[in-house]
Image (cartoon, rainbow, N blue to C red):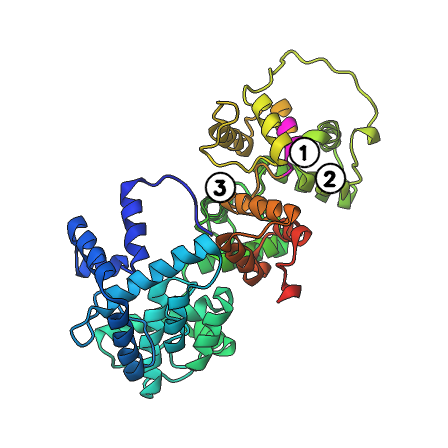
Amino acid sequence: MSKIRGQGPQHDQQCLLAGIDITAEEAGKAPMTAEEAKAASQAAARLGGSAGLASARSFAAARGHLALPFDYVHEEYPLGRWLVAQRSKERCHLRATGTAWPPGLRLTELDPWWNPPWHFPWQRHYQQARTLWQEGRLLPGQHALPGDRDEDEDLLTVWLRRQCARHDVLHPEQQNLLTDIGITAATARTVTASLTTPTLGEIGLAQARSYAAEHGNLAVTDRTRHNSHPLGSWLLRQRQRAADGRIEPARLAALNALDPHWNPPWPLAWQRAYHRARAATDNGTLTSSERRWIRTQAQLWDSLNPAQQQLLADLGTTGPAAVPTQTRTTARHYPPGEGLPHARAYAALHGHLAVSIHAHQDGFPLGRWLVQQRRKARSGLLSARTLQELTVLDSWWNPPWPFTWQRNYQLARAAHATGQPTPPELDRWARKQTTLWHQLHPHQQTLLTAIGPHTPHSR
């Protein structure tokens, strides 16, 4: 899942280059000015369709695929750039109409994966590996051993190791393609297990497993050390990566399995207090301070996240009605946040608060205001009144997973509720959740189940 955030002109240039299948590595090998790139694209657009198709047929007949680099010339014809233009046209047609692009069907007959749903450089690397396999130089179970190969093949070996490590999160069709060259799920596990030098991430995950087995949770402070390992600071970095959408899916799934609330949307101090109260409740050693904390949570019940309420229910707390009424006066009163009226108006119209950072409501910058409130909530600085109101408006206004996911979910939910056709890019997102189902947070799974049918049961 990628993070949607303004990243400057350099990122925009990188995205444009990726759109014509130029990776960072290729850009370093063959730098191209903006004028040269524009001229190349215009030249490719002017090329005749019949000549391009004839060249594609010739290449596919000789090689069996169309996974070419952008600057590849076949029999004096710039076939690579022509195919880049065709892929762009097909994607634009699909976004605009949601139907197949007729000229693309002729290319599909030559190579079913000439325009795959995954990043195109993956397909080029795969075809290089397939060539080695057809030549008998790529044997199942030996993908982790570079052997006596040249530099390009060593780079391919690194790529193959990465596919073995990521096998479970690849697109099902990518997995099928790898199976065709001898890399099954079992082979991938064997190759990954043969890499005996653990990475820092693997060491951190191993320590997290050890700590969770001993304590039953991962609600540690930033300074916590476990077996001399700085587990607290490692988990802090994982939470930051999860918030930015940069954490590896397999690692995220593993942490969610160890503790579904290892990265809560509420302050981590609350989670630590909860686990202290739960341990004391289980042991029958509740102190007066822990009882007072439980009573306070009951009084603040309506301002808590539904997941917090479920955790408290495990302690026998079900809300204010279960606690004797106490009259207390406070010396401090917090006025309502200036954005609350606009948040109420937006939620009344849309039923949620998963808004873009650029969103405005009646002229008010609601998106930026909500970003600030999420930051305050995570650091424990948001007033109880504002927290309560926002939670009532949208239980998942501050989710523990990347906010981009929540926005896509609400778009899918709206399409499901209205019965309108789902846009192609949103439909692809929904199908991806099926592939990544076991790596999602349990609450994400619950949300998706409510709108179906993108669950493992529909596969």
Nearer to the camera, 318 or 287: 318
Q: Earlier in the sequence, mark 1 or mark 3?
A: 3
Q: Type of residue at label 2?
A: Leu
Nearer to the camera, 19 or 267: 19
Query: Mark 2 = which residue?
Result: 312
Label 1 to label 3: alpha-carbon separation: 27 Å
Residue at the spot 37% in from the left edge and 39% down from the top edge: 6
User: Mark on residue 379?
Assistant: none
> Could you tell me residue 22's position as x and y percent?
27, 59
Residue 358 in view: yes
Q: Residues within 10 Å of mark 2 (few under 14, many from 20)?
A: many
Q: Type of residue at label 1?
A: Leu
Q: Residues within 10 Å of mark 3 (few under 14, many from 20)?
A: few
Q: Earlier in the sequence, mark 2 or mark 1?
A: 1
* Disc nearest the viewer among 2 and 1: 1
Label 2 to label 3: alpha-carbon separation: 26 Å
Tag 1, which secondary structure?
Answer: loop
Please say if 88 is above or below 79. above
Left or right: residue 146 versus residue 248 is: left
Q: Which range is magenta?
A: 389-395
Label 2 to label 1: alpha-carbon separation: 10 Å
Residue at the spot 57% in from the left edge and 41% down from the top edge: 399
Residue at the spot 55% in from the left edge and 60% down from the top edge: 431
Tag 3, which secondary structure?
Answer: loop
User: Mark on residue 223?
Assistant: 3
Query: Mark 1 = which residue?
Result: 304
Left or right: residue 79 versus residue 428 is: left
Residue 162 in view: no
Left or right: residue 324 versus residue 35 is: right
